[in-house]
Amino acid sequence: MSERKGFFTDTSVCIGCKACEVACKEWNQVPADPQGLTGNSYDNSGELGANRWRHVAFIEQKVSVGVEEAPPESFAREAARQSLVSDGLDPHEDADGFRWLMSSDVCKHCTEAGCLDACPTGALFRTEFGTVVVQPDICNGCGYCVVSCPFGVIDQREGDGRVWKCTMCYDRLKDDMEPACAQACPTDSIQFGDLDELRERAARRVERLHERGREEARLYGDSEDDGVGGFGAFFLLLDEPETYRLPPDPVVPTRRTPEVWAAALGAAAVLAGGVAASFLRGRR
Amino acid sequence: MGSNMAEAHPVGFQWVVEARERGAKVIHVDPRFTRTSALADLHVPIRAGSDIAFLGGIVNYILENGREFREYVQAYTNARTIISDDFRDTEDLDGIFSGLDREGRKYERESWQYKGMDVGASAGEREYGEAEGEQAHGAHGGELEQGEPPREDETLQDPRCVFQLLKKHYARYTPEMVERICGVPRAQFLDVAEALCANSGRERTSAFCYAVGWTQHTVGVQYIRTAAIVQLLLGNIGRPGGGIMALRGHASIQGSTDIPTLFNILPGYLPMPHAHEETGLDVYVERNAPPTGFWGNTRAYMVSLLKAWWGTAAQYENDFCFDYLPRIDKDHSHYRTVADMEDNKLRGYFVMGENPAVGSANSKLQRLALAKLQWLVVRDLDEIETASFWHDAPEIETGELVTEDIATEVFLMPAASHTEKDGSFTNTQRLLQWHHKAVEPEGDCRSELWFMYHLGRRIRERLASSERERDRPILDLTWDYPTVGPTEEPDAEAVLAEIGGFDAECEPLADYLPLRDDGSTTCGCWIYAGCYADGVNQTARRKPGREQSWVAPEWAWAWPMNRRILYNRASADPEGRPWSERKKYVWWDAAAGEWTGEDVPDFTPDKAPDYVPPEDATAQQALRGDEPFIMQGDGRAWLFAPSGVVDGPLPTHYEPAESPFENPLYGQRANPVREEYRRRDNPLNPTGREAGSDAYPFVVTTYRLTEHHTAGGMSRTLPFLAELQPEFFCEVSPELARERGLEHGGWATIVSARTAIEARVMVTERMKPLRVDGRVVHQVGLPYHWGNRGISTGDSANDLFPFALDPNVHIQEVKAATCDVRPGRRPRGPELPEFVRNYREQAG
């Protein structure tokens, strides 16, 4: 088995060009899925789904002056401060700063993958690269995996019935090529490689950003202690995960399987006891 | 500034991101908060069309506070040169320079000259002069007379020296004035000015990146001139990390000026000869080759070009076929041509790699004009709007065009895309990069090279038996490119080799220095000489950066002479020593007696820093060893441009042709020599204090989105791109939305005197109202990609804009104009022109 492969998506250098979305669709022959103009900033593709395996989120945000988010020596803060003290020529109601977050989302390829656990046919499998892939020729479209994904990533394709999601370009990996999205990314916001190495790189990156006063930088999905045993595709975010419409504390449903079984067994025992009791009563 | 680099040049922007990661500060000055601003350390919202005031403010800040790189300015610029006593500045004449011919809308430029002499421009503009066909004074044959060097004041104190004139010219561009004109709070402006100064000097350098946000104005050339002045004062030219990056609009737009698709220059920026009188090669050279500097070799460049084109037919006896070159008789730029087309003065038209029915200003007039042609050839990937106008232009719906009445015969030729052909791209930093064909083009799709070659071949076959004199230029052409494959595709490398040039032994040239004026050398573009050195396609080199020096000379090939930074002699001090260890780049090696360093030195290799030219020296030999700007007749960079720019020797803030404001600096509101087409089909909005200007109260600007490509011919047709930006929209601030009742996601109608268009509304805090000249002004943003064809369709933003042009390069002003915005969709059919007419009438 090869080293486990993964993505490290560093949103602090994402320029929202969507080259990842297009490259993914081109390589994987994912159908177009026009949503029309959504009015949600520059995001016109909505969310990950059967027809969208990479998705760039756009978040327009006002940031208050003086909060920790602005690095102490930054131009933005200084300019904002100065425009506050200048003689009120700024017609804006306040002199708040502004930022525009962009982030390319993708299947997390969880260590404990709910979709994989739920698949009754074996269509979903874990590859030699540690990624989770659907085999479309086996998938029967039962949809159990769809409700088992804590991120809402895996999705049934309309008119087809089967489920589709990011394969981390399994075919390219087998040919020793990096996934299409990572190759297309002009600023290296999407980095592909050995997961262990990516985690080290990401930790160093966060440290560096903190040193430069960007305290808001944080990793999402890099810890094996989380509810899915760590992501195979993790992120550096500049705000809470909820801001990016990501679950703050995702848990794989099968984590609760023992409890569920115990409860079920308990219930069965009670039920069995009741039945027995009724028989006993009947005999009397 | 003037660029949304992250969105329009995302691949190049990776280097900005990397520089920022290494500690560079990125400042974005732009009317809108864009994806570039998102990655910048500071975004400064500015009123569209006011950048000269902002940059002029920086010039003033530098000079007022003594922040210039004094040694650099003194040694390498024309700061010390004394200007003619006849020169009058805009400060003296309330916004105009001496020499204005108001009626002719042009400047006579004698008074702008160096005292006691006449200086030639460095490139392109000399021969052409004015549109009417007159030679521009001072724009040709710079008489840098020997034995009479320019009068100078090394102390920079003389009131008539450039340095003092500059100081006076910009003295009123104070932070308060910047705030008043640009809408930038003075504190924020001072932040930018100080950051730039602090990051310049011996140890550090700063760079400017601009794109069409600077050029597409009626004072576009002067925008860039102002940046050049800032960069020269700070010593940021010819040094690593410095410079002014012109981000070009398409792949190889740089290439299409080097080997021009323009009407007034020949390859390598040689001026196009003029038809105003009988002239031969001698007169051309006399007019266009200043005796000093590298342009002194103009004859060698021209003769080598003529030899490349006409081969053995070009001989000393016949002036090397100089007479075969077409002559220009007047302005033949894009907008003049379209106006002529509409006026029935043009029969046929070729459109290649362009979609003017969407991409040009007043695109409605473009479409109407196409219907006046006898024939039209369009080569493109799809049936773009320029090819389909006769059956589905918006004017069909309004009744202004009727298909049955259009006599234009349209030839739509399917084009091969860049992946389907070999060739080179020349990009913004003059880098020629070869691309190889990946797949064969489908069906009848062919490359431009194939089309032009076979068109030429067929024309020559038709004319083969002709004995007419006028057919000789075509029949004598060297038109013998080898072809490959079943489609007989010409070998693109053979064309590159011809451009790169050959010596007398038919060996490929190593560079342009061996070019001769005796007909022994051939070269299709003198600045490209050496791109095929040693018979190797130098542009196809792809050695990774990590395997070579940080300058990466073995990645592709840069003109001229594979030099990565122009004028890099300026990276060393007058004695030839690097200005600092940190910024060392090219320096004088006294022991070896030559210039050396990281890059190919941009200087005569063995010319010592203390070289003083003998009295009779010409061309580059006439420049001193401490004069790095070798294309200029005086070897210095021009803070003050005595020639080469038709609208003033110093950049001056003028309001856009259409603006809601008067000019707070001068009585002269807009560029006095801007080109405006005042005609029925190109009405202009009332502006400034004019009656009715309040009918068009908002500033409007156009731009591009990452998801689409220019006029959309390559992107609106592709499902994966169309779905990412599916509809035409306008960006407005919440304040403007409130003021005009615009609903986010709803529709807005945007109106100018030309027409009205509709767009979906994007209300966003990325758009910010600004306080300009005492009142709040709103700006409206319009991406210009849309037209009526393709998967993603919409009205064309360019329909709104007038033919109002920069007088130097005839580029349209689409980055700043005025408009009105109202909620809801626009009227349909014949009601649309009626609606626009009513608007105009109400405005007066």
Image (cartoon, rainbow, N blue to C red):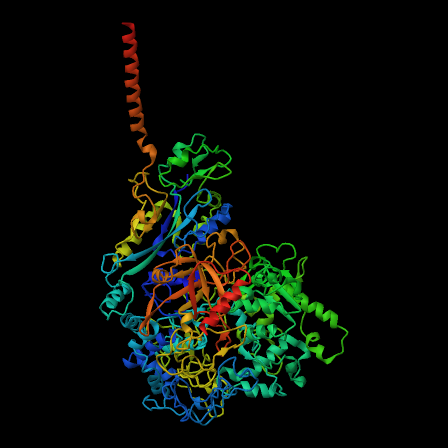
Q: Residue B337: x and y, percent?
A: 58, 74
Q: Residue B101: x and y, percent?
A: 48, 88
Q: Nearer the viewer, residue B454 or A276?
A: A276
Residue at 29 percent of width and 64 percent of height: A92
Q: Residue B163: x and y, percent?
A: 35, 85
Task: Say whether residue B339 is left or right of residue B101.
Answer: right
Task: Say whether residue B492 is left or right of residue B596.
Answer: right
Residue at 53 percent of width and 78 percent of height: B513
Q: Is residue A108 above or below residue B131?
A: above
Q: Quadrant of the N terminus of chain B?
A: bottom left
Q: Would residue B598 be visible to someone looking at this image?
A: no
Q: Nearer the viewer, residue B330 or B284?
A: B330
Q: Is residue B256 above or below residue B272?
A: above
Q: Is residue A275 above or below residue B609?
A: above
Q: Is residue B729 above or below residue B753?
A: above
Q: Nearer the viewer, residue B591 or B283?
A: B283
Q: Residue B761: x and y, percent?
A: 42, 58
Q: Would residue A77 be visible to someone looking at this image?
A: yes
Q: Nearer the viewer, residue B614 or B448?
A: B448
Total marks shown come to 0
Task: Say whether residue B501 is left or right of residue A221.
Answer: right
Residue at 51 percent of width and 88 percent of height: B137
Q: Residue furthest top?
A: A284
